Amino acid sequence: MLAAVVDILSWAALLGGSFFYVVGAIGLHRMPDVFTRMHAVSVSESLGLGLLVFGMVLQAGFTLIAVKLIIIMVVLMWTGSAATHALARAALHDGERPLLQDESGRLVKTDVVSLFPELQHRLAAPLVSEAVEGEVPAPHPQPGEQQA
Amino acid sequence: MMFAVAIVAVLIALALAVARTLMGPTAFDRLLAANNIGTSAIMLLALFGFMTKRPEFLDIGITYVLLNMIGTLAVLKFFRYGALGHAQNVKRDGDDF
C-alpha cells in the first residue's frame, strides 16, 4: 500500500519535473533576448530539477543514494543562481540592453541607466573586453566614482 | 518506464539548449545555454543510472557538478576582469610578459 503511494508520488514528481524542464528549454530557445532567456532557464533549473530529484529520492528511499542526489541538487541550485546573477551582471557591464516596453507598448532595447540613474556608478565600471588591450582598470570601482 | 519518460524530456531540453548554443547571438546566450547543457547532462546521468538500476552513476554526476561549477565561475571571472589571473597580472601596454 505504502509502496504504491510512494510510486504514484514519484511518477507525478518525475512527470512534473519533465514538463517544467521541457518548458524551460523551449523558453531558452524562443525568448527574444538574453535576460528573458535567463528567466526561462531558471524555471527548468529550479522547479524542473527539484521535482526530478524529488522523484528519484522517493525511488531511492532512505539510502546513501538519496543523500548524493540531495547534494547534487543543493550544489546545482546554489551555483545555478550564482551563475545567473553573475551572468546578468556581466551582460549589463558589456552593454547588453534589455528589451522593455515603452509608453506606446512597443518593445525596445532600453538603456537601463536611463531608467535607474543610480545604477550609473555601477554600470559605468570598465568594460572587461577593454581590460586586456588598453589601460588596466581598478578591479572594484568605488561607489560614487564617476567614470570619465 | 517513468525514468524513460524523464530521460526523453531531458534529451529534448538538451537538444534545444544545444541549438541555442550554436545560434545564440551573444556570448552570454551561449554561456547560459552551455550552463544549462551541463545541468541537463547531470540529470541525464542520474536518470540513466536509476533506469538501469545502477545508481553508482551518481558519483560521476557529483564530479560533473563540481566541474560545472568551476567552469562557470572561471568563465564569469573572465568576463568580469578580462583575465583569469590576479588583476595585477592583466597585460598592460608596454609590458612584455
Image: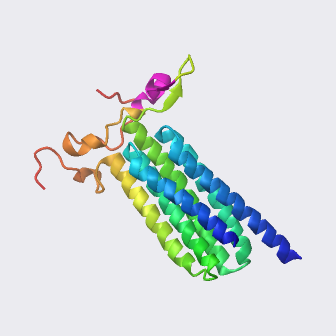
Q: Viewed as shown, does residue A109 lie left or right of B50? A: left
Q: Is residue A117 magenta?
A: yes
User: Which secondary structure class fits the magenta region best?
Assistant: helix
Task: Report the residue at 46% width, 26% height from top.
Answer: A110
Q: Is residue B30 above or below residue A101?
A: below
| Residue A69 showing in the rendered view | yes
Indicate yes or no whether the magenta region holds residue A81. no
Residue B29: give x, y in percent of width and height. 43, 46
| Observer-nearest of B23 and A134 | B23
The residue sitting at the top extreme is A104
Q: Say if B92 sits above or below A56 in the image.
A: above
Residue A143 visible, this orientation:
no
State the extent of the magenta-drawn residues as a range.
A107-121
Measuring from the top left, give residue B73's x and y in whole percent: 42, 57
Residue at image coords 36%, 30%:
A145
Q: Position of residue A63 (x, y in %)?
A: 69, 80
Hey, which residue is sitting farthest right in the picture? A1
